[in-house]
Image: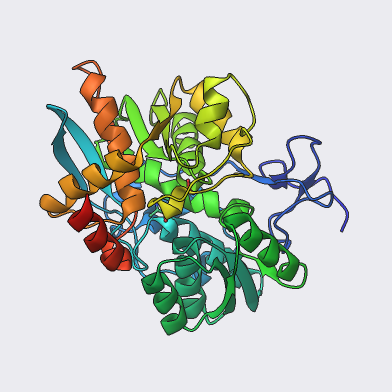
Amino acid sequence: MIATSCDIMQRLVNHTTGESYPLDLPIWRSESGALLDLEFAGAFDPMELITRPATLWRYQEAIPISNPKGIVSFGEGMTPVTRMTVGGRTCLVKLDYLFPSGSYKDRGSTVLMSQAKAIGIQSVVQDSSGNAGASVATYAALAGIDCEIFVPDSTSPAKLDQMRAIGATLNLVPGSREDTANAALAAASERYYASHVWNPFFFHGTKTFAFELCEQMEWKVPDTLILPAGNGTLLLGAAIGFEELKQMGITNRIPMLIGVQTSHCAPLTAAWESGGSVPASIQTQPTIAEGIAIAEPHRGHQMLKVVKETGGKMMSVEEEQIAEALRWLCQRGYFVEPTSAAVFAGAMRYCEQAPNDELIATVLTGHGLKAAAKIQKLLSTS
Ligand SMILES: *Cc1c(COP(=O)(O)O)cnc(C)c1O
């Protein structure tokens, strides 16, 4: 495959070398194996949204897929935004655990699988600590595309059951999350890699988080947005979304982005604290926040960069704080998985010390039903 000079308004690009590719190639990394980003100058008109259905596809002029008629969608998105009192102040919380597969990953999957279908893909591989696999498998089922998922053998049983029931072929890999990713990479040499980490289409789905939040706030943006920092699919997606809103002239600033990690797996917080621009190499410990236990995030340097550019930071929370946040949320009827509680624990800590006039928003990312047994155990022992 030769890198061509393609439409400059719309391309896959390796920012290190400048090489670029057209969007309709079935590739997910550059010829030299580097990360690709997707550049796309789409724009929607807020006035035109008023009559459209309340789904994330209401922003379709800003979503780069080749065939808008073949969209793979359940009508997902436009998740509620609630107000909670946290640390004595109001915090906006977007309920992204309310998606068809039970996590916000569906934002990325609906776009990624729509593109896969548009370019004629019949079989995909994916790897995941659970939710990304469940999400891609869900949209593969809807699209009628074959799907094989590689997961660590420590994945929550309910997530495995979910993927099996949907009809994905499961491949349980012993060892770490990185071992799983390597097994999937090997399989991806033959098939399309529907990776939420590598595939740049995924991020042009997660960016709709920013569009929705902004629309739901009557086209304003929060001062601070607290998000998970695992592989950064939401953090980087939100950054793209806010940047595009700015370019469309809808907003004039970008929220301060704060990424939350667990102290048991915090390569980005370690890098942040030592002023590094790439993830630190770290020792990990077991964590209840399986969804953000990413020791070697491929897009870590991008995450550190956007956090810095927006004036935000990376922070870590302790396992006990995660359990405490989970209890707090459950007692108020927000039944989410422990990974979501980790992000919320970060938001709680942040809210306790933030200036009173700062408008803070965060997200609940994954449904508790996927981890019900684990939650029960945690709440009865902590
Ligand atoms: C994937 C996931 C995260 C972490 O998101 P990243 O994109 O890896 O930063 C957080 N919470 C839940 C429930 C997830 O599934």
Residue drawn at x 48%, y 53% as measured from the top left: 205
Q: Is residue 210 above or below residue 291?
A: above
Q: Is residue 217 left or right of residue 111?
A: left
Residue 37 picture quarter? top right
Q: Give 68 or 99, whichever is nearer the viewer.
A: 99
Rendered-image quadrant of the N terminus: bottom right
Left or right: where 356 falls relative to 120? left
- Residue 242: x and y in percent read 44, 34
x and y, in percent, of residue 334 in the image:
18, 53
Residue 135 in percent (x, y) is at: 45, 66
Residue 174's place in the image compared with 32, above or below, is: below
Question: Against 198, is 117 above or below?
Answer: below
The outermost residue toward the front is 381
Along the viewing direction, whichever of 233 and 344 lies nearer the viewer = 344
Number of residue marks = 0
Residue at image location 33% in from the left, 59% down from the top = 55
Q: Nearer the viewer, residue 67 or 302?
A: 302
- State the residue in front, 277 or 287: 287
Residue 219 seen anywhere in this rendered image of the structure: no
Inspect this view and state whether residue 288 appears: yes
**Which residue: 73% across, 61% down?**
25
In the figure, residue 355 lies in which quadrant? Answer: top left
Q: Is residue 190 left or right of residue 235?
A: right
The colour scheme is rainbow
Percent x, y of residue 310: 47, 23
